Amino acid sequence: MTLCPIANEGDVTMSLAVVDKKVLVTGANRGLGRALVEEALRRGAKRVYAGSRQPMVVPDERVTSLVLDVTDPAQIREGVERVESLDILINNAGVSVPDDLGDRSAFERHLAVNLYGTLDVTQAFLPLLARSRGGVVNVVSLGAVAAVPVLPAYSVSKAALLSVTQALLAGRGVSVYAVLPGPIDTDMVRALEIPKTPPEEVARATLDGVERGEEEIFPDPMSHLLAEGWRAGATKQLERQNAALVAIEPIAA
């Protein structure tokens, strides 16, 4: 697989209104994914493609259900064939299973969905997004910047996804957004005895961030604590410095 860069020199993440847009949400059958579908509809999306491993029914004629397992290349290709045009891709599909660093298969499972699945879906829909000068919204996690000890494989996969998202910030007129939520009140973390934010609030804040053109979106009270320091901090400055390297000729090995 060859990674296509998503933005030319000088491109920046732009604000992107949802109204009258065509939106694809992966992992749309429950939790945050379902909330994102409903929030996009509330904001006047023209069409919402709801991607999930099993067909889903939403009582709104603007919703098209797509059987889309992000780890299945054939289903990704079929999804592209069914979507004639696209403005916003929301990569929400993910997996989170506790592990103890002792099982390599746990890492492979998380990476297959959270990293490679997101990347494969993005690559497949990139031509449509470039045509519309649309956007890619990657649902990452605060676990990407501070590992959750009981979820090491999940944290590693999300850290890798954050790096991929940062790398995508250089390319072809398509805006890229990283969503960095804390714990959300969904099945994924229901067993953890920690404060959680309702998925509806996270969905609303996520699309608010897209409409404001925020490269990193901190959509809940826990993540809000990091927002100001992140945007003004050395890590973000280094990211921008590294992004400028796309304008430099590669150095021969």
Image: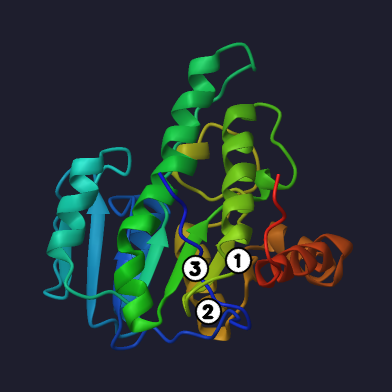
The residues bearing labels 1 and 2 have C-alpha atoms spaced at a distance of 9 Å
Label annotation for residue 208 = 2
Q: Which residue is mark 3?
A: 6
44 vs 122, nearest the viewer: 122
Q: Is residue 71 left or right of residue 239?
A: left
Residue 65 locus on image (x, y percent): 16, 58
Residue under label 1 = 219
- Pointer 1 or 2: first along the chain: 2
Q: Which residue is farthest front? A: 252
Q: Is residue 224 left or right of residue 22?
A: right
Query: Where's the C terminus, which quadrant?
Result: top right
Residue 220 lies, in percent from the top left, at: 63, 63
Within 10 Å of the Cα at label 1, are there few (<14), some (14-19), or many (20+) other Cα atoms?
many
Q: Nearer the viewer, residue 130 or 108?
A: 130
Asked whether the viewer can see residue 67, the reply is: no
- Marks 3 and 1, how far apart at CA: 24 Å
Question: Which of the 4 quarters of the picture holds residue 74?
Answer: top left
Question: What amino acid type is highlighted by mark number 2?
Answer: Asp
Amino acid carrying mark 1 in the image: Pro
